[in-house]
Amino acid sequence: MEKLTIFLAEINYQEFKNKEEIKELNIEERHLKIIFDILKNNLFATTDSHYYPVLFNTIKNKTSPKTCLKIKKLFLNDYFNISSNV
């Protein structure tokens, strides 16, 4: 989880949006920006999976349940290819 936190701390929205894993989710642009802002403003929540329910609830409330399920899958299955170039 530490790698994910560092990864998120170091990227900007454009880099996040252009990650292949994110593109494949087909999330609306406005929802993607909201998700990015939530993640950047709550990096502590990406450090430990015990915080994920709060993180996912926030994402669900600010976007939609469907969007939340898409991003949740990436987190729970560790699909982020953090080591690849952005």
Image: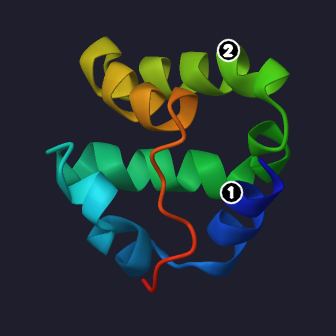
Q: Nearer the viewer, residue 5 or 63?
A: 5
Determine which residue is flagged by label 1: 4
Task: Tell me if mark 1 has few (under 14), some (14-19) or many (20+) residues whose alpha carbon lies within 10 angstroms of its own.
Answer: some
Q: Nearer the viewer, residue 78 or 30?
A: 78
Residue in the image at 75% along x and 58% along y: 5
Instruction: Work out whether 84 lies above or below 45.
Output: below
Identify the image's colour scheme: rainbow, by chain, secondary structure or one colour: rainbow
Distance CA(mark 2)–CA(mark 1): 17 Å
Determine which residue is flagged by label 2: 53
Quadrant in which the C terminus is drawn: bottom left
Q: Is residue 41 left or right of residue 86?
A: right
User: Which mark sits nearer the N-terminus, 2 or 1?
Assistant: 1
**Residue 74: % across, % down:** 44, 37
Numbered circle sitting on residue 49:
none
Location of residue 13 by image quarter: bottom left
**Residue 81: % across, % down:** 48, 62
Secondary structure of residue under mark 1: helix
Instruction: Work out whether 56 lies above or below 47.
Output: above
Q: Answer whether labels 2 and 1 touch (C-beta < 8 Å).
A: no
Q: Nearer the viewer, mark 2 or mark 1?
A: 1
Residue in the image at 30% along x and 43% along y: 31
Instruction: Work out whether 59 lies above or below 81.
Output: above
Q: Amino acid at mark 1?
A: Leu
Instruction: Work out whether 44 lies above or below 51.
Output: below
Q: How many marks?
A: 2
